[in-house]
Structures are given as structure tokens and as C-alpha cells.
């Protein structure tokens, strides 16, 4: 793990040394395999998305030792001080989902935020944002459209996006009766989006 690494410590490194989109996806796929092998009880028991995301982040950290791997990281230091990550379109969509929610549990509603489930990055810099991940359990009552919208926004080159994530992944986690299926990347965003 990069002990206290900050952007000033890594700026000396050439950004061309970042892993390729293919390498990033392979490390994610390997981490999903490890999650399935080592933590099948979490999937069988249909624990919270946050608990599953945490375990997946641990396996990703092993494969990305030069980066930070964080769950629900909500800071954008380049927006001034300790500002939260913010993309207006996403905040509007999250609010609509919450307002339209009638049959959703509190846990489902908590999963609707503009904060990414997992990111691989260097803290205090947007120059080293290499992977953003949204996970969705097979038992979730919330549709995946918001997660897809979030991934598109954080990996796009649009005016509202200052994060410039190199890659994004929408990951389906099969839980409960479906837990015999290995978690998989269902959609890939950013560089090499057609790789599969």
C-alpha cells in the first residue's frame, strides 16, 4: 500500500507508466475471482454492498500496490480544499431516485450516492485516477441506470468531469440463491471500452 503517498510524491513518475486498460481490467477480473473463492459466504448470505465492496477493495489493493484503493471516497482536493466529489447531473439523478423510492429499503436508498463504490487512484490528485467501480448485487431493487450514468460521467472528458478516470467498470455481484455465479464485469467504460 502506498504509505501516505500523495500526488507530490508521485508526480516525478512518468504517467505513461500507468497500467494499461487491459492490465487494469485483468487485475479487476483476478480480484473478482479471489472474492468468489475466498468470500463466498458473504455472497451466499447477501450481505450489504458496502461489505462486499470492502473485501473487493482489499484484493484490488494487493494488485495495485502503488495506488490507493478506497471505498466511497468523497473528496476532490483539486476543487479547493476538501470539497466533496460532485457532478451536478448525478446529484439530480440521485435525488430523483430517492424521491421516487416507494418500495426500497433503507439499505437500498443508502446505496444511491454520487460517491463511487470503489476507486483506484492517488489521493489528493485527479491525475492518477485509474479505475472507478460500481457494484450491484443481483438482489438489489435499484436499477443499474444510475450506476451506468455515474460511470459514464466519471470517465468522460466532459466539462463537469474533473476526475478523468482512465477506466470504469460496472460489476454484477451474484448473491443468495445466485451466488454460485462468479461476479463479473458487465460494462466497461473509458479507455478500451470495447475490450472484453
Image: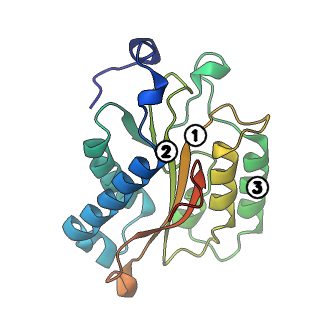
Mark 3 vs mark 1, foreground winner is 1
Rendered image quadrant of residue 144: bottom right
**Tag on residue 165?**
1
Q: Residue at x 25, y 62 (%)?
A: 34
Above-or-below relation of 58 to 6 = below
Q: Secondary structure at mark 1?
A: loop
Q: Residue at x 55, y 41 (%)?
A: 166
Residue 131, given in percent of the width and then of the height, sits at 49, 44
Q: CA distance from mark 3 to mark 1?
A: 20 Å
Mark 2 closeness class: few <14, some 14–19, many ≥20 residues within 10 Å = many
Q: Which residue carries the number 3 mark?
A: 93
Above-or-below relation of 111 to 132 = below
Q: Residue at x 41, y 39 (%)?
A: 19
Mark 2 vs mark 3, foreground winner is 2
Q: Considering only order in the chain, which callout, 1 or 3, is on the residue closer to the N terminus?
A: 3
3 to the left or right of 193: left
Rendered image quadrant of residue 43: bottom left
Q: Residue furthest left?
A: 38
Q: Which residue carries the number 2 mark?
A: 131
Amino acid at each position: 500500500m502506498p504509505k501516505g503517498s500523495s500526488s507530490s510524491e508521485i508526480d516525478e513518475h512518468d504517467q505513461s507508466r500507468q497500467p494499461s486498460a487491459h492490465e487494469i481490467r485483468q487485475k479487476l477480473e483476478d480480484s473478482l475471482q479471489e472474492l468468489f473463492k475466498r468470500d463466498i459466504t458473504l455472497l451466499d448470505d447477501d450481505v450489504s454492498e458496502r461489505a462486499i465492496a470492502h473485501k473487493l477493495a482489499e484484493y484490488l489493493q494487493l494488485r495495485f500496490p502503488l495506488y490507493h484503493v478506497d471505498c466511497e471516497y468523497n473528496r476532490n482536493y483539486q476543487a479547493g480544499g476538501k470539497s466533496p466529489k460532485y457532478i451536478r447531473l448525478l446529484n439530480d439523478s440521485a435525488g430523483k431516485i430517492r424521491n421516487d423510492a416507494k418500495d426500497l429499503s433503507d439499505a437500498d436508498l443508502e446505496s444511491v450516492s454520487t460517491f463511487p463504490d470503489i476507486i483506484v487512484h492517488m489521493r489528493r490528485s485527479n491525475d492518477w485516477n485509474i479505475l472507478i467501480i460500481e457494484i450491484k448485487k443481483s438482489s438489489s431493487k435499484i436499477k443499474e441506470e444510475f450506476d451506468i450514468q455515474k460511470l459514464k460521467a466519471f470517465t468522460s472528458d466532459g466539462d463537469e468531469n474533473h476526475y478523468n478516470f482512465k477506466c470504469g467498470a460496472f460489476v454484477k455481484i451474484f448473491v443468495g440463491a445466485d451466488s454460485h455465479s462468479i461476479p463479473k464485469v458487465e460494462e466497461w467504460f473509458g479507455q478500451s471500452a470495447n475490450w472484453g
